[in-house]
Image (cartoon, rainbow, N blue to C red):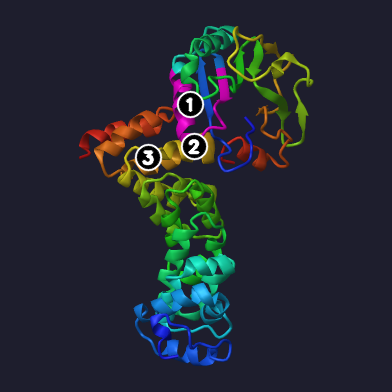
């Protein structure tokens, strides 16, 4: 997830990777990012704890499993905004395809060394407002596997694409 | 002029007597001997005092500089603080620690202290960072010192028990020193949120740093406090769980 600039660019960032039996779920989120890190970190921990046993028999049930756990988190434990600032991007895959879902995203790109292009248009429901939703959002099933990694930008993260692959990885909090 | 050192300026004629006054001040070795004079000058002849303290021919004895520190408040009403302290640092090397300490105490959030620290301290930045530790500007000051390479001072400042020095060091690309600073912060304050700050700066790939941090923990209390914070980092969590029973 492409994060913002500033002193604490990755404040509130969390991720969860799960795979079993050909089913895979990659999830990255950001919550309470504008709070001081000591306020944010317990919220990050709550998400990690909630998602510890995420999984499913196929990609859609894995997505559903993640949403179920997130939707039942007590809002009071999700930081000063009570989870209304959550940005979340989920990618689930199995032998039949790849589905993506999310909230609080400004844009999602397909990224490769050669080019970066938007995965969806600016009005697509994948780019839903931030916050823990009332119901699990729909998932977008991709027609084909993306050429490279999918990069999502949380809302307010200054989502212009980074110039180089190294910079892109750095802005995602990943060591190049 | 005999009584000027007792604060009686009735016979003082300025600017005619300024040279004689300067010579008299230069002969005083004890700053206490200048206190009454400087206080009186601050009230009645502040421009003359400024000239004596930070002018082109400022009195450069240690006693004069120390006496000037006793009247910095009225001096700061007449001249920019940065200029005052910079000049005081220039005129007398032996009093630099006192000058920078006073500047840091009075202006903990001042960015100009970052540059002055190089002039004033063997380990630049220590006085400023220590004085600023309880101030809301502390994070910004940590980053400012990191940006100019005051890394040793940041490691020492971590001994205040704050997490920001470690975070600033990580932000500056000094992972090794960030770990050391985090360990020192935890040694002082076992509940210091170093993991939260390191993650906020470094993102999700800081587990290698945490694996270096865990063996440096000095107390079981710090280890216990860190347990919950390490939940997102399974390898570091396992390492901590393995060493925690042996910690005092």
Query: A117 and B67: which one is in front?
Result: B67
Q: Secondary structure at mark 1?
A: helix
Q: Which residue is mark 2?
A: B199
- What is the CA distance from the residue labelled 2 to the residue labelled 3? 14 Å
Displayed quadrant of residue A158: top right
Q: Quadrant of residue A138?
A: top right
**Residue positioned 38% across, 82% down in the render:** B6
Task: Describe the element under mark 2 as helix, strand or loop.
Answer: helix
Nearer-the-camera pick, A164 or A152: A152
- Residue B76 drawn at (x, y percent): 54, 66
Evaluate whether label 2 is on the same chain as label 1. no
Q: CA distance from mark 2 to mark 1?
A: 10 Å
Q: Is residue B152 visible?
A: no
Does residue A55 show up magenta in the picture? no
Check if residue A32 falls in the magenta segment. Answer: yes
The reply to whether callout 2 and callout 1 are in contact (CB within 8 Å) is yes
Q: Which residue is mark 3?
A: B192
Q: Which residues are magenta?
A: A25-49
Does residue B176 appear left or right of residue B14 in this picture?
A: left
Q: Nearer the viewer, residue B229 or B126?
A: B126
Please give the residue where the numbered disc 1 appears in the rendered image: A44
Which label's residue is closer to the chain start, 2 or 3?
3
């Amino acid at each position: 997830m492409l994060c913002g600039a500033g002193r604490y660019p990755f404040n509130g960032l969390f991720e969860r990777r799960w795979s079993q039996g050909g089913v895979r779920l990659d999830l990255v989120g950001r919550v309470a990012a504008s709070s001081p890190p000591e306020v944010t970190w317990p919220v990050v921990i709550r998400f990690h704890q909630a998602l510890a046993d995420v999984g499913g028999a196929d990609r859609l049930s894995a997505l559903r499993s993640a949403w179920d756990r997130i939707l039942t988190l007590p809002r009071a434990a999700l930081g000063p905004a009570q989870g209304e600032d959550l940005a979340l991007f989920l990618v689930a895959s199995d032998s039949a395809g790849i589905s993506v879902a999310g909230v609080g995203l400004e844009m999602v790109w397909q990224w490769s060394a050669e080019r970066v292009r938007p995965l969806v248009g600016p009005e697509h429901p994948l780019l839903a407002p931030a916050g823990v939703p009332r119901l699990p959002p729909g998932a977008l099933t991709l027609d084909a596997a993306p050429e490279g990694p999918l990069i999502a930008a949380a809302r307010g993260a200054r989502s212009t694409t980074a110039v180089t692959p190294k910079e892109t990885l750095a802005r995602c909090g990943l060591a190049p | 002029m005999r009584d000027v050192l007792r604060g009686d300026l009735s016979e003082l004629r300025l600017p005619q007597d300024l040279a004689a006054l300067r010579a008299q001040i230069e002969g005083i070795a004890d700053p206490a001997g200048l206190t009454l004079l400087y206080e009186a000058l601050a009230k009645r002849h502040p421009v003359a005092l400024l000239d004596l303290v930070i002018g082109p021919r400022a009195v450069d004895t240690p006693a004069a500089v120390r006496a000037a520190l006793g009247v910095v408040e009225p001096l700061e009403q007449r001249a920019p603080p940065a200029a005052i302290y910079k000049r005081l640092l220039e005129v007398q090397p032996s009093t630099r620690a006192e000058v920078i300490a006073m500047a840091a105490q009075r202006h903990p959030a001042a960015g100009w202290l970052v540059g002055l620290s190089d002039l004033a301290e063997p380990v630049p930045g220590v006085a400023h960072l220590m004085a600023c530790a309880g101030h809301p500007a502390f994070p910004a000051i940590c980053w400012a010192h990191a940006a100019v390479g005051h890394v040793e001072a940041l490691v020492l400042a971590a001994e205040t028990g704050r997490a920001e020095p470690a975070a600033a060091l990580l932000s500056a690309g000094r992972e090794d020193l960030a770990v050391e600073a985090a360990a020192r912060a935890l040694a002082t304050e076992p509940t210091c949120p170093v993991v939260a700050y390191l993650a906020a700066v470094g993102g999700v790939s800081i587990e290698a740093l945490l694996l270096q941090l865990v063996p440096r923990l000095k107390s079981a209390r710090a280890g216990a406090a860190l347990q919950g914070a390490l939940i997102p980092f399974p390898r570091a969590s396992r390492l901590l769980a393995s060493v925690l029973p042996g910690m005092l």
